[in-house]
Amino acid sequence: MKPRIPSRLKSLLVYQTDCFQVDLSKVLSHLHGCFCALHCRRIQSISFIYPDSSTIAAPRWASASALRTCTGSRLRQEDSPPRIVEHPSDLIVSKGEPATLNCKAEGRPSPTVEWYKDGERVETDRDNPRSHRMLLPSGSLFFLRIVHGRRSKPDDGSYVCVARNYLGEAVSHNASLEVAILRDDFRQNPADVMVAEGEPAVLECQPPRGHPEPTISWRKDGTNINDRDERITIRSGKLMITNARKSDAGKYVCVGTNMVGERESEIAELTVLERPSFTRRPSSVVVLADESVEFRCEARGDPFPTIRWRKEDGELPKGRYEILEDHTLSLQRVTPADVGSYSCLAENMVGKAEASATLTVHVHVQCLLPLQCAPGTRWWVWGERSPFSVRPRGTPSLPSFGREKGARTCCSPTSPHSPPVVSLCLRPGI
């Protein structure tokens, strides 16, 4: 049963340490009696104390020095202490940009809201009309622009909003406001890279320091690189290209990006070199002695390959060979000593290639027994160097070039100790 309250106002001693003392001017006085309302952080409750010393005594922990007098009237039944219904969230904002820390509180009567940063009360436009911080009717804290620098007190820090009415106060969760930054200088700029076609290529980059940590992308010749290409991987600042192609060559930049903006690195050039390959290979040749021969060879590559000639197991004939501007090897007045394999070598800084062709020289030999040729013809004789076989008995096979020129074949007798000899009777001009 509630104790009887005297009709006249009375005084009451209450504990004040660590407590929020109510503003008695806000207490409704339509009820009889005297009370004092406290929000004590230690016990997290609202205490209503009636001034009847016969039924309610002062708390045991209240010493005489910690007591004060409070007067007032009884509480309206529908009033309630503040309660935070929307807490502020952490923010990362660019310098100079607007931002809002949200806070919403409920209570009856409607609570007033104040903000604190790192334990200090925040000055708003209600305190100073020139302030860039505005306290909105909802209780949120709006920044016209985020200040960050040495010349003025920065806005970054840890914030709480505090809602109060005469029944007590409520404190929100902490919310951090951080200022985004992005430096100008890259920690590592990409360097020029040179690889051979088909080899992997790697370009490395470390973006500028920033908060939040910047992400990395790459551009080639001003166009963003499509990392959906299965040959391309971007990881930990590295651009990796497997099986590099000539089309991958170009100018690359590394791009560091966060909410502040983006920064571009210095330009790095990727050069994809091409190993030598032949567009025309030399062909084997069969000629008569004292004739001239040409071996043609064409190659490509990047850088353009140098082309040189060599003779297998020997040297090019001194004074009788020439390498033309188009890299053709020309041999004059060939002899049996020139017979062999000739190689065209194409070489650049990333590789080399080789192609070979054979030179066959047919020589004249003296007929053991001169062949009687028909008037208007002359005779040629091929001995053991001839590319065709000669049977000791019977007619030897005809050389292909002889057959093509319509020469008739004669078999001249030989001595028992001499190899077979084939004589051809050729018309002049053949």
Image: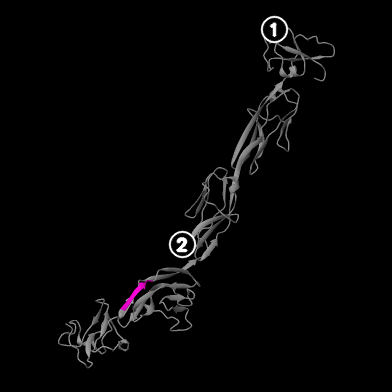
Residue type highlighted by circle 2: Glu
Q: Mark number for residue 394?
A: 1
Separation of marks 2 and 1 at Cα, in angstroms:
95 Å
Residue extending furthest toward the right:
376
Where does the image place residue 91, in percent across and percent down from the top left? 43, 69
What span is colored magenta in the figure?
81-87
Q: Is residue 393 left or right of residue 27?
A: right
Lateral position of residue 148 relative to residue 364, left or right: left
Chief secondary structure of the magenta span?
A: strand
- What residue appears at the point 45 percent right and 82 percent down from the top-left corner? 125
Q: Quadrant of the N terminus?
A: bottom left
Side (left or right) of 338 relative to 138: right
Image-based side of 102 in relation to 259, left or right: left
**Is residue 86 one of those drawn in magenta?**
yes
Is 84 contained in the magenta span? yes
In the rendered view, would you say 404 is above or below 217? above
SS state under label 2: loop
Residue 213's mark? 2
Give the x, y percent position of residue 71: 26, 90
Crowd around label 2: few <14 · some 14–19 · many ≥20 (10 Å)? some
